[in-house]
Image (cartoon, helix red, strand yellow):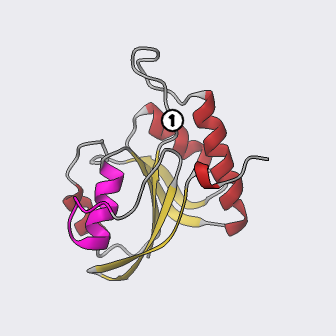
Amino acid sequence: MKLYLVQHAKAAGSDVDPDRSLTEQGRRELQRVVDFVKPLDLSVDYIWHSGKTRAAQTADVLSRVVRVRHAVTVRQGLSPNDDVSHLAGELAVLKVDVMIVGHMPFVARLASLLLTGRDSALPVAVKNAGIVCLGRLDPERWQLEWAVTPEVIREE
């Protein structure tokens, strides 16, 4: 199983936009990441997102280059401060590839729990519009396969 963890792209502050839509900078950075991963020909069974505007917009852009076999769907339990242990238990036995578009600190804490067994270790830096790919070795062991952030991709 492959798990792709994505922090939504940069969004406007709630004082500027109560819905917190993606900013132009966020859209540009996300497009750089999308262009970078496009040759990887990624495919997943599902893209799950929190339902918040910034996560939904990020998921929509990703779904244009990531083949989604089933659906892009809102998933409960992906909000910034939700408990990651519930989802980690489900992922331990899931047999399909999934991309999760969520928020900090949830995404970093989920990666931490899967990789180290503790949600506070934070072994991977998760950035806006970045993608972290984890591979499940067995129900209790995961490994970091790769990660990309807008900062490591050269602008052309």
Whole-percent x and y of residue 125? 42, 56
- Residue depicted at x 26% and y 80%: 140
Q: Is residue 85 left or right of 115 when viewed as pictured?
A: left
Residue ranking furthest to the top: 15
In magenta segment, residue 113: yes
Q: Residue at x 61, y 32 (%)?
A: 25
Question: Residue 64: in sight, yes or no?
Answer: no
Foreground residue among 26 and 65: 26
Rate crowding at label 1 as few (under 14), some (14 to 19) or many (20 or more) other CA atoms within 10 Å. Answer: many
Question: What's the magenta region?
Answer: 106-122
Quarter occupied by the N terminus: bottom left
Location of residue 114 with respect to 128 vertically, above or below? below
Q: Which residue is mark 1?
A: 10
**Secondary structure mostly seen in the magenta stretch:** helix
Q: Per the image, is 85 magenta?
A: no
Q: Amino acid at mark 1?
A: Lys
Residue drawn at x 34%, y 65% is: 123
